[in-house]
Amino acid sequence: MLDTPATDIAPATATAIATAVAAGRVTAQSAVETALARIRERDPLLNSFTAVTEQRALSRAAAIDEARARGKKLGPLAGVPFAVKNLFDVAGLTTVAGSKINRDNPPAARDATLIERLEAAGAILLGALNMGEYAYDFTGENIHDGPSRNPHDLKRMTGGSSGGSGGAVGGGLVPFALGSDTNGSIRVPSSLCGIFGLKPTYGRLSRARTFPFVSSLDHLGPLARSTRDLALAYDAMQGYDAEDPACNDRPAEPVVPLLDRGTEGLRIAVASGYFKCKSGEACYAIDRVASALGANRDIEIPPAERARAAAFTITAAEGASLHLQRLRQRATDYDPAVRDRLIAGAMTPATLVLKAQKFRRWYREEVLKLFDEVDAILAPATPCTAPLIGQQMFKHGDVELPVRANLGLYTQPISFIGLPVVAVPVPLTPLPIGVQIITAPWREDVALRIAHTLEAKGIVAAMRPPL
Amino acid sequence: MKRKAKVTAKAKPKVKAGPTRAKAVAKKTVTAKPRPAAAAQPDAVDMLIAASTETLKLPLDPSWHGGVKFNLQLILRLGAVVDEFPLPDDAEPAPIFRA
């Protein structure tokens, strides 16, 4: 499996690579060289990477191969290449966060906590990935680095803001990548690129040494081509970190050992009302997943439209607050679309922001009541399949909506209260689309078990792109 | 597949029993509906932009005005969707500072 040529776009999973490296069937060095060759060949098309850390990766691979030769026990991700959205600190690289302005900053002195934890488990960082400027984006377009391109159709968006993460994983350049999700930025590219994405519970994974966007809504998580790979990466990253004030002091709860428990006994419902699908693809995907799971009841999430409005309001004000000084000094160096949103956000009345935060607590209590009756809720991940790069509007039912602000209309009310979600890809032709599996706080295990079951049944899968 | 039962949470704020809260909510029901921020007319938004850029010392090239105004109108419209939702006076905001 691992000796497939770089041109084969169906590379090994993280699970297969780690197993092969641990067994000595392949070296970490060859796993890294294969991935580097794919990046050289495919990334000029996909525009996923903004930096490739080749020397670091080869050095790390040599250390793993040497450790194995000495008989040392290897970590669960030994030899597995991965990459990170370029808002993660990577020692020696400047953390650009998709911007022009941050390029003037000095290189990071130390890796982000999640990179350190993945490398402690044997994974090997291959580089930093393209993203929407300062993560204020659902498209994956970037005026400074060019757009990330969808592996299933290079004329189309990856979705954002973790666009490079979606493209690199969907395009087979790396088995998994890390992204961030404030309002949907892991789940939207997962849906449009046809891969799996995990947005864990707010406070589960450390955000230390990553460039923030909206601290009260920011999450980090993995994107991968299989549920097991998501779980492997997630387990390696869990655990308290005092360096992130929002990180919950909660012991790690490994999910890999639970994946095969199936879904028997789980109560699964489909979100109705606001979440009712309006496109043929989204409806087909939800029906297919619900049918496979025997999810035969609807459930209405209380006023989700207001939740989305509140998330939008908090995002506008908190994002603007983060950038206020930069806006004063370097407004012309922003992507104009981001700049205009941030300047407008700076003018948001404080009264509305505080009301939104109060609504957030009320809404959370109401939604948590639903989990007395169900264990998981299904909802579309995106309202449509991948729009064309540069496309401004899309049809949502009978109305035309702006793409940039609305690709996350199904994701925003969920991350607003920090619920864990696994986005699973339903393989459609010509373009895939995702479904969200939403569970109660700290029950990532339930969402991943459901995703794993769907994958085993062939209902969801990361499609091989026609590159 | 046909789905069976429909579970719907009440789209009303939870209010604990107690005279103070009950009174507060009852009062809300007779209070005149607050004017949503989205009711601001375009010229009012223009004035808000002008005043805010001045007081916050933000740059605003005239060519940016349309984009900023579009986004501010969107924020105010969505903010009003939240603003019009009744919550009890003692509703706590989501983030809690821990000393």
Image: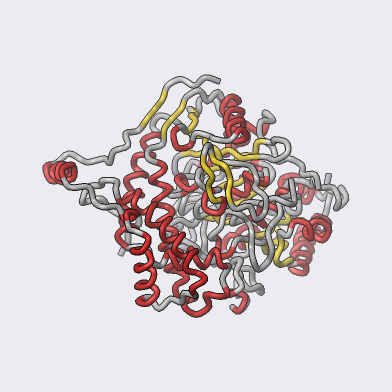
Answer left or right for A184 relative to B38.
right
Answer left or right for A87 relative to A11.
left
Q: Residue at x 49, y 21 (%)?
A: B3
Q: Position of residue B78 (x, y in %)?
A: 39, 52
- The quadrant of the image that shows the C terminus of chain B is bottom left
Q: Residue at x 52, y 25 (%)?
A: A295
In the rendered view, tell whether residue A402 sits above or below residue A365. Answer: below
* Res A48 seen here: yes
In the rendered view, tell whether residue A386 sits above or below residue A40. Answer: above
Q: Position of residue B72 (x, y in %)?
A: 42, 61
Residue A238 or residue A218, whichever sits in front: A218
* Res A120 seen here: no
Q: Residue at x 56, y 28 (%)?
A: A290
Classify residue A47 by image quadrant: bottom right
Image coloring type: secondary structure
Answer left or right for A454 relative to A365.
right
Q: Position of residue A326 (x, y in %)?
A: 49, 75
- The quadrant of the image that shows the N terminus of chain B is top right
Residue A12 or residue A359, whichever sits in front: A359
In the rendered view, tell whether residue A437 sits above or below residue A12. Answer: above
Classify residue A317 by image quadrant: bottom left
Q: Position of residue A133 (x, y in %)?
A: 58, 64
